[in-house]
Image (tube, rainbow, N blue to C red):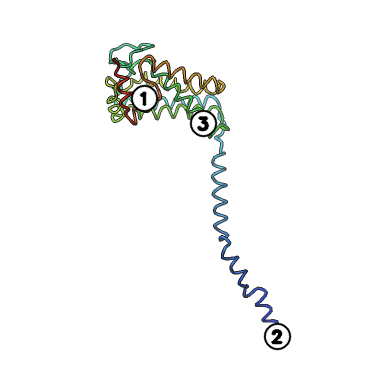
Amino acid sequence: MEASERSRQSRNDGSLPSAATAMAAARRPPRHRALNRTTACEVFWHRRKRTPPVIPAGAYVFIIALLLAAKALVLDAMRRPLICPCGVVRIWQGEAQAADSSQHLADWYSGSHVIFGVLLFWLMWRTSQHWPTGWLFVVAVASSVVWEVIENTPAIVAHFSETELGRHYLGDSIVNSMADSFFVVAGFALARALPVPAMVALVLVLEIAAAAAIRDSFILTTLTFFYRVPEITSWQRGP
């Protein structure tokens, strides 16, 4: 009798859990799932905070030079001309619908590349402000290189040429594309150096100046690329 009573107590203590204990265990998430969620959060956080190693200044310059050289080679393979087919390289070309649009060093669309650099800095500041400055500029140049290559693909050139102001657009010369990357980096550097109000003022001035001069701007170009607004098209066509 004594042994039987001891066995019954042993089962009640741990071997056979009570109904309340069983229900609590059923509600509790499996331990491995909780651990997996914690691990995933920790991994994401550490990746977000991961910082590239600091390298010598000359190494940053070398990487940027490689990126620009790679862009030039890709554009050359895409049969983009080195300079304007007219045989002249101008510092400034102010006519948006001229046959040599986007063939020289600077034009009204150079301001759009400055704005792109400003927006890129804002994005990097929000996500990677702890990165070394050199790597931030490498990302700025790499982003410009990727966009310039995409912009000069036949499909994108054809799409731009369907817009009201892009009828004469045939793509960029390599010289113009290199200058565009310079303007992106300039915008990135200005955004890094200027206070926010000055940065906003700079973007507004560039947008208003381009809209007043050629009836186009960074916002209008982006909008008409994805969606044609009849009123904007009519305004850009002019009287």
Location of the N terminus by quadrant is bottom right
Q: Hey, what amino acid is under mark 1?
A: Thr
Say what secondary structure mark 3 lies in. Answer: helix
**Closer to the eye: label 2 or 1:** 1
Q: Is residue 237 above or below residue 46?
A: above
Instruction: Pick whichever of labels 2 and 3 is earlier in the sequence.
Output: 2
Lower position in the chain sequence, tag 2 or tag 1: 2
- The answer to whether mark 2 and mark 1 are in CB contact below 8 A is no
For this orientation, the residue located farthest to the bottom is: 1
Q: Of helix, strand and loop, which one carries label 1? A: helix
Q: Is residue 179 left or right of residue 157?
A: right
The kind of residue tagged 2 is: Ala
Residue 161 at x, y = what percent? 28, 24
In terms of depth relative to the viewer, which is nearer, 33 or 79? 33
Frontmost residue, 164 versus 136: 164
- Name the residue beneath numbered marker 3: 124
Q: How many marks?
A: 3
Q: Compare marks 1 and 3 and give the one earlier in the sequence.
A: 3
Residue type (three-letter) at the residue carrying disc 3: Met
Residue 192's x, y, as percent? 54, 23
Instruction: Report, in whole angstroms, how far the alpha carbon at label 2 lies from the one at label 1.
Output: 89 Å
Q: Position of residue 236 (x, y in %)?
A: 32, 19
Mark 3, other Cα within 10 Å: few <14 / some 14–19 / many ≥20: some
Q: CA distance from mark 1 to mark 3?
A: 23 Å
Q: Badge 1 is on which residue?
A: 221
Which residue was labeled with disc 2? 3
Q: Nearer the viewer, mark 1 or mark 3?
A: 1
